[in-house]
Image (spheres, rainbow, N blue to C red):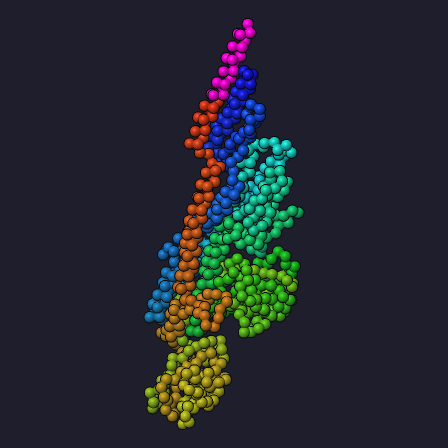
């Protein structure tokens, strides 16, 4: 009997010693990252003794997977909001506002209109023009700096993800080697390390896990691509840019060393990497393109208006701004040797959308141009251009279908293109930081109109002639040396109803107006309708009344063309969308366009903050749920420690009793 008691007490001491060790291990690892609480369980008694204990990790796989998913969503929005908030604050600051610079430009323009002969007021206009250029450059620089930061962080995060993927693969190999056919217990530390590595990987990208053979964990991206496979094999991330080396794309190195681009939506990728990519695609790329589009539209509008007037030197106005030119990025798979540069076709500033463009060779003599969204996907239909025999310059005049959209682009294409070659044009992206003034001389501001009109003193009616509208100073009505091609132009009312004669000393015609006396030269027909200017008659001219239009020689104190500049502030000149319909208002003013940039950034940032708060709450709940099962609870462990200590003491007392009985038996035998 005493022998049985001794065995029972010994097994009880051993069992409670294991329980105390497990509890002590839990308490000691309270602050160990990734530690999973353990519990020692015993089988039913073997004979009169406690069976061998089995220590298990208290891990709920479903709770762990849910936690990893919620962590991926939380870190996605944390990263997005952290990056977006900086840009949102910078764009919202009054000192950074492009509207302030635009308003200053038009205010100084008004001063020049009030004093068209003043060189001081003209100089102030160019000072504010330079300030506008500098402000665009600063804002573009802010966005560019953020893009560089994104690239640096993407490199860091991809390297971190690669290290974790390697670690998971190595730990899988170690676990598979420790598990034997007899199901020998594996060191829980290895499992903890692997689960912690998977959790940290989930903070970088969205992942899913599956159980493999021999305790392995197979890891996949949420979109399905394999990261960690059987027997320790794994694929690694890399960052590559094709065709733009500064625009990093996430790739996955598969077996054989070949890198393939992951076709993954950043919103699906999740994690810190997904947050960075989404921030770049949803905020940085649109903001950069819209800033560049504004720079091009402003420059083209002012250039075109200046071309319609006379400057203070008596010459036709020239460019006030230099429209940027951007070199196209060639894709790595191109087989030809062609190169392409892109700029804006003069006068087409309101046709260019805030997009990048893909140029692809259809044949040796044709290319297609497609607008791309902020993630590089095609928007709308591709447009076909005839390129003839390169080198050549192509624009809207070279559209295979003339009525289609040329996006305002003008392309310079060299020889050597091969069918299938592709090029990426980022004209808008680079424009805001490349915009420059073409001149700084106040005299080059063409405020005067090149034509002036007058009423004959012998007229008997009160009819008047409008000031005239100039549409093209390179047309047939003007000479290169500023003057009218054929001298003063005279319009006289005949005795026939609605009939007029027109003469410029070289050409004479008689015509009948239809309905009203608007656009008289257009109604007179060729060659007068091609002169690049026109005028209206107001009132009811009497028979014999005549009206004259002549060159505005010496019109230095004239601001009639300058009034066209002032109208640019309220004219819708910035295109909004690639796809439009005839009844859609697809244009905005300069200030409206900038307000849209600020609003888009603010709205996107606030939406991300709202979503981020929701996913942070979910992650907190998942963390609490997971910790309630797998985390160490000091109160519970302290209670267990006391309980197991008392049980240990009781088992020891059994041995003491067995010893006393044995001693009694020995004494009786003497």
Task: Identify the residue shown where x is 63% and y is 59%.
Answer: 334
Q: Is residue 57 visible?
A: yes
In the drawing, does residue 313 fall left or right of residue 4? left
Please tell me which residue lies in front, 588 or 199: 199
Q: Does 667 lie within the magenta span? A: yes
Q: How many marks?
A: 0
Task: Report x, y in % for residue 186.
Answer: 58, 32
Q: Does 407 lie within the magenta span? A: no
Q: Is residue 304 above or below residue 19?
A: below
Where the N terminus falls, by quadrant? top right
Q: Is residue 282 above or below residue 650?
A: below
Where the C terminus falls, by quadrant? top right
Question: Farthest top residue?
Answer: 670
Q: Quadrant of residue 365?
A: bottom right
Task: Report x, y in % for residue 259.
Answer: 62, 50
Please tell me which residue lies in front, 345 or 400: 400
Task: Identify the residue shown where x is 49% and y is 34%.
Answer: 37
Task: Report x, y in % for residue 159.
Answer: 55, 44
Q: Taken as a whole, is the magenta stretch helix, strand or loop?
A: helix
Q: Which residues are magenta?
A: 649-670
Task: Report x, y in % for residue 470.
Answer: 43, 77
Please tell me which residue lies in front, 404 or 518: 404
Please tell me which residue lies in front, 260 or 643: 643
Q: Is residue 303 visible?
A: no
Q: Quadrant of residue 450?
A: bottom left
Question: Farthest bottom residue?
Answer: 495
Task: Identify the residue shown where x is 50% and y is 18%.
Answer: 654
In the drawing, does residue 466 fall left or right of residue 472? left
Task: Identify the residue shown where x is 40% and y is 70%.
Answer: 571
């Amino acid at each position: 009997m005493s022998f049985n008691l001794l065995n029972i007490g010994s097994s009880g001491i051993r069992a409670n010693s294991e329980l105390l060790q497990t509890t002590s291990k839990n308490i000691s690892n309270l602050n160990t990252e990734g530690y999973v609480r353990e519990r020692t369980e015993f089988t039913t008694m073997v004979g009169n003794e406690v069976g061998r204990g089995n220590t298990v990790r208290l891990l709920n796989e479903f709770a762990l997977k849910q936690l990893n998913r919620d962590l991926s969503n939380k870190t996605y929005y944390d990263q997005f909001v952290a990056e977006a908030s900086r840009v949102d604050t910078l764009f919202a600051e009054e000192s950074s506002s492009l509207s302030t610079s635009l308003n200053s430009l038009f205010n100084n323009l008004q001063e020049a209109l009030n004093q068209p002969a003043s060189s001081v007021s003209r100089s102030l206009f160019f000072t504010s023009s330079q300030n506008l250029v500098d402000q665009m450059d600063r804002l573009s620089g802010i966005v560019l700096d953020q893009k560089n930061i994104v690239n640096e962080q993407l490199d860091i995060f991809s390297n971190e993800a690669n290290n974790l993927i390697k670690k998971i693969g190595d730990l899988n190999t170690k676990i598979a080697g420790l598990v034997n056919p007899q199901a020998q217990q594996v060191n829980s530390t290895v499992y903890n390390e692997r689960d912690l590595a998977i959790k940290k990987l989930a903070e970088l990208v969205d992942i899913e896990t599956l159980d493999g053979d021999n305790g392995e964990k197979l890891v996949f991206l949420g979109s399905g691509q394999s990261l960690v496979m059987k027997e320790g094999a794994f694929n690694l991330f890399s960052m590559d840019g094709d065709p733009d080396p500064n625009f990093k794309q996430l790739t996955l190195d598969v077996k054989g060393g070949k890198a393939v681009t992951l076709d993954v939506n950043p919103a699906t990728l999740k994690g810190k990497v997904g947050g960075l990519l989404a921030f770049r695609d949803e905020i940085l790329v649109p903001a950069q393109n819209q800033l560049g589009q504004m720079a091009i539209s402003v420059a083209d509008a002012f250039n075109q208006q200046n071309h319609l007037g006379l400057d203070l030197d008596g010459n036709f106005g020239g460019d006030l701004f230099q429209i940027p030119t951007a070199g196209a990025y060639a894709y790595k798979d191109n087989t030809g040797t062609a190169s392409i540069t892109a700029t804006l076709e003069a006068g087409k500033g309101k046709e260019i959308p805030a997009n990048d463009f893909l140029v692809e060779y259809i044949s040796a003599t044709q290319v297609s141009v497609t607008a791309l969204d902020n993630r590089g996907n095609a928007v709308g239909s591709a447009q076909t251009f005839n390129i003839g025999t390169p080198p050549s310059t192509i624009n809207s005049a070279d559209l295979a279908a003339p009525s289609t959209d040329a996006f305002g682009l003008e392309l310079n294409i060299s020889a050597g293109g091969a069918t299938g070659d592709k090029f990426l044009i980022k004209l808008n992206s680079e424009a805001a930081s490349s915009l420059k003034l073409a001149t700084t001389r106040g005299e080059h501001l063409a405020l005067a109109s090149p034509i002036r009109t007058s009423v004959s003193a012998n007229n008997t009616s009160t009819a008047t002639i409008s000031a005239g509208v100039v549409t093209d100073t390179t047309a047939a009505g003007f000479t290169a040396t500023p003057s009218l091609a054929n001298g003063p132009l005279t319009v006289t009312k005949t005795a026939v109803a609605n009939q007029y004669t027109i003469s410029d000393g070289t050409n004479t015609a008689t015509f009948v107006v239809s309905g009203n006396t608007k656009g008289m030269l257009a109604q007179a027909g060729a060659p007068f309708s091609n002169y690049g200017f026109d005028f209206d008659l107001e009132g009811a001219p009497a028979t014999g009344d005549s009206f004259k239009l002549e060159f505005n020689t010496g019109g230095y104190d004239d601001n009639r063309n300058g009034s066209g500049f002032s109208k640019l502030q309220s004219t819708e000149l910035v295109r909004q969308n690639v796809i439009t319909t005839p009844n859609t208002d697809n244009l905005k003013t300069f200030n409206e366009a900038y307000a849209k940039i600020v609003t888009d950034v603010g709205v996107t940032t606030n939406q991300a903050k709202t979503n981020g708060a929701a996913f942070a709450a979910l992650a907190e709940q998942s963390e609490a749920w997971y910790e309630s099962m797998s985390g160490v609870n000091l109160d519970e462990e302290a209670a267990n420690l006391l309980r197991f200590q008392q049980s240990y003491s009781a088992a020891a007392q059994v041995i003491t009793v067995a010893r006393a009985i044995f001693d009694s038996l020995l004494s009786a035998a003497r």
